[in-house]
Amino acid sequence: GTRLVKYVELVLSCQTMMEPKFQAGDCHVGWLVMEAFTLMRYAQTKDGPVAHEGVELTLDLPSSWETGDPKIQADEVRVGKVIYHLVHNAVKFTPSGSVKVTGSEEADFVVVTVEDTGIGIDPADQQRIMEPFVRLEPKSYRGLGLGLSV
């Protein structure tokens, strides 16, 4: 079961990465953030790479975000994947401590911030994390290095 799901996710991620077309439309950022956060909270209770019971997950969003606001024009699937992978990596690489997801609207911008007390990324490697198949983490962590590039 789990292995098949991983393969399906990989194929879908590769397809999305190679697909040049964006499906621009209404993108409900609040719902995407809450979905990613809820998935990570659930995943913490299961046996897997983000099963860190000692990690405190905190969500701090404006109340209007619970109704889907803010709404932007973007590819909702891709924006959702970006938010999911940021939250997933924060939880995955924080064996203990905290992960905080916040949202705000500043002028004409929607800001989603993911802060954690995890292992961090060496400043020299920060540009490389968006490249496909780049894995900076110790080999004991699972993954192909596709998450942030997708």
Image (cartoon, rainbow, N blue to C red):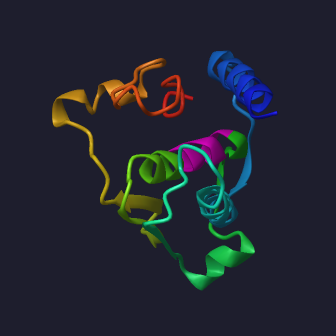
In this picture, is 128 found above or below 36?
A: above
Q: Which is nearer the eye, 99 or 84?
A: 99
Percent coordinates x, y for residue 6 in the rendering = 71, 29
In this picture, is 8 found above or below 26?
A: above
Q: Main secondary structure of the magenta part?
A: helix
114 with respect to 120 (left or right): right
- Residue at far bottom of view: 63
Q: Residue at x 26, y 39 (%)?
A: 121
In this picture, is 6 found above or below 132?
A: below
Q: Which residues are magenta?
A: 78-85
Percent coordinates x, y for residue 127 in the rendering = 29, 28
81 with respect to 6 (left or right): left
Q: Residue at x 60, y 45 (%)?
A: 48
Q: Which is nearer the eye, 134 or 29?
A: 134
* Quarter in which the C terminus is drawn: top right
Q: Residue at x 27, y 45 (%)?
A: 120
105 in magenta: no
Percent coordinates x, y for residue 109 in the rendering = 46, 60
**Residue 18 visible here:** yes
108 with respect to 78 (left or right): left
